[in-house]
Image: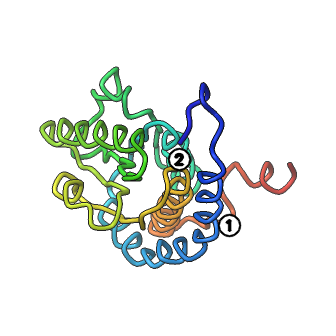
């Protein structure tokens, strides 16, 4: 992924990104097969009332989206933070009863993605020593993350930017099943119906 100071890409990179987009529907179908796992995780986390969602770089907005979806569908308290800021205040909330939902995916062909991933794994190690309950969104077969997390929802390998689209699906499924477990009608969210229907 290119930074704002170097926003141009080569024709070969452009072609690779377009090819990656053509493969997204199949990859999304694979992620949707995690529905049963997300339903099971919603039962495991059914007693939690507070969640912290963490993402770094382009994955921070996905963490915020996951927190927002959980709030509006399940009526639970959830906040999304850049993972690098966890130790600047939110760290005081880390406990077994406040699960961390950490986005720990990686594009091994992107040096910036690998660096981001290494920082996330380091943070996961620190949080485990604090007794954190970690639900990670990670690449399929990532044994390092699996060893550190309490639970993992795997996504298929993809480019850094495509990973963001794949990460959203399990977060939405988790929110959906958390709401169902709480007896909430997800088609009629409390206090959001007017905004959703009329605006």
Q: Which mark is residue 106?
A: none
5 with respect to 113 (left or right): right
Q: Are marks 1 and 2 in contact (CB under 8 Å)?
A: no
Extreme residue in the left direction: 129
Q: Is residue 96 left or right of residue 83?
A: left
> Residue at (34%, 52%) from the top-left corner?
48
N-terminal-most mark, 1 or 2: 2
Locate residue 184, reporting x and y percent: 56, 64
Which residue reaches farthest top? 88
Q: Position of residue 78 (x, y in %)?
A: 46, 43
> Toward the viewer: 167 or 67?
167
* Quadrant of residue 45 within the rendered picture: bottom left
Disc 2 designates what residue?
Answer: 62
Q: CA distance from mark 1 to mark 2?
A: 22 Å
Q: Position of residue 146 (x, y in %)?
A: 21, 59
**Residue placed at 53% from the left, 48% from the top?**
71
- Which residue is disc 1 drawn over? 187
At numbered mark 2, what does the secondary structure look like: helix, strand or loop? helix
Task: Give residue 131's position: percent from left, percent from top.
Answer: 15, 42
Name which residue lies at 64% across and 34% down: 7
Q: How many marks?
A: 2
**Res 139 → quadrant:** bottom left
Query: Which element type, helix, strand or loop, lies under badge 1?
Result: loop
Residue situated in front as seen by the camera: 170 or 16 = 16
């Amino acid at each position: 992924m290119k930074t704002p100071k170097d926003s141009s890409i080569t024709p070969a990179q452009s072609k690779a990104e377009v090819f990656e987009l053509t493969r997204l529907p199949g990859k999304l179908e694979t992620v949707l097969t995690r529905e049963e796992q997300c339903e099971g995780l919603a039962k495991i986390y059914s007693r939690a009332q507070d969640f912290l969602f963490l993402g770094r770089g382009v994955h921070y907005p996905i963490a915020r989206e996951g927190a927002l979806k959980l709030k509006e569908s399940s009526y639970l308290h959830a906040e999304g933070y850049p993972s690098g800021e966890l130790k600047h205040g939110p760290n005081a909330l880390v406990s077994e009863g406040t699960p961390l939902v950490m986005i720990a995916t990686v594009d091994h062909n992107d040096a910036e993605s690998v660096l981001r991933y290494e920082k996330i794994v380091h943070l996961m190690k620190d949080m485990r020593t604090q007794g954190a309950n970690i639900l990670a969104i990670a690449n399929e077969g990532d044994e390092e993350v699996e060893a550190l997390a309490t639970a993992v929802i795997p996504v298929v390998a993809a480019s850094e930017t495509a990973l963001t689209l794949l990460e959203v699906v399990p977060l939405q499924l988790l929110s959906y099943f958390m709401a169902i477990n709480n007896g909430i009608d997800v088609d009629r969210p409390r206090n959001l119906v007017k905004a959703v229907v009329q605006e």
